[in-house]
Structure formats: C-alpha cells, structure tokens
Amino acid sequence: MTHLRKAAAALAVLMLTTVPALADLTLLMVEQRGCAYCRMWDNEIAPIYPKTAEGKVAPLRRMDLNAAQPADVTLNSRPAFTPTFVLLRDGVEIDRLEGYPGEDFFWGLLARMLETEPEWAAHTGG
C-alpha cells in the first residue's frame, strides 16, 4: 500500500510541475497627486477592491503618472490622464480604461476588460 501512495504522490507532483501556469494579471492604476477622480476612486472602490472577484483575479498595483515607468511594465502608450487603469498580463498591457466614471460604471467596464481572460472565467465559473 505504501508503494501505491508513493506512486500517487509522485504522479501528483509530476502533474503539477508539467501543467503550464497562467500568467499573472494585474490592474495598474496610474494616478497623480491632486487628482480628484483618483481620490474618489480611493474612497469608493479601494477599500473593497482586494475583497472582490476582480481584485483577486487582477490585484491592484499603483504608479504615479509623473514617475518613471517601472522596468517590468510595458505599456502601449504613456498614460495622459488620471486615473488610468491598465490591465497587465505579466507586466504587458492588454487593455485600458481612462478616467473614473464613478462606482456604478467602473465595475461593468472592468468586467468587460476581464471577460476574455481565462483567470476570470476560472474564478467566476464562466
């Protein structure tokens, strides 16, 4: 019986190491000091974002508009407005939302950005 358990454990390890991992999704928030819409997002969304399905699938990362772009981030173009929300896969831009349209619209627009991503489908069962 112990040989069977050892073989099952070895098979499980082999399966886990040969299945390709999904790439990391991140939601990059580009902001700047004095941005009223950034502050509004911070008040309305930031406290709950990490607790939501969206926050679990695409954790938030922040970047100051005036700071140098991080070396591990590749954007299609430099953001011009704040806030700008950029969906990243392994640090590479795949979609973007410019501005904060308010809480009621933000969630729907973010869901639209995520809807084709396999992590979102796996997390939401869709």
Image: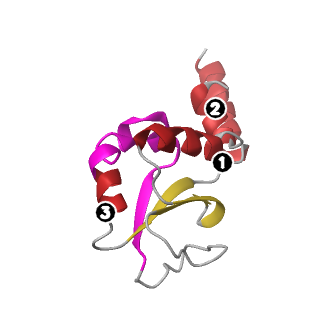
* Foreground pick, 20 / 13: 20
On the image, numbered disc 2 is attached to which residue? Answer: 122
C-alpha span from label 2 to label 3: 35 Å
> Which one is earlier in the sequence, the residue at label 3 or at label 1?
1
**Residue 18 visible somewhere in the drawing:** yes
* Foreground pick, 32 / 11: 32
Q: Are marks 2 and 1 in contact (CB under 8 Å)?
A: yes
Describe the element under mark 3 as helix, strand or loop.
helix
Q: Give the extent of the magenta segment.
A: 43-65
User: Where is residue 119 drawn, in percent x and y?
Assistant: 62, 40
Disc 3 or disc 1, which is closer to the eye? 3
Classify 10 Å Cα crowding around label 3: few (below 14), some (14-19), many (20 and above). few
Amino acid type of disc 1? Leu
Q: Residue at x 42, y 46 (%)?
A: 102
On the image, numbered disc 1 is attached to which residue? Answer: 22
Describe the element under mark 1 as helix, strand or loop.
loop
On the image, numbered disc 3 is attached to which residue? Answer: 36
Residue 33 drawn above or below residue 112: below
C-alpha span from label 3 to label 1: 36 Å
Left or right of 78, for residue 126 = right
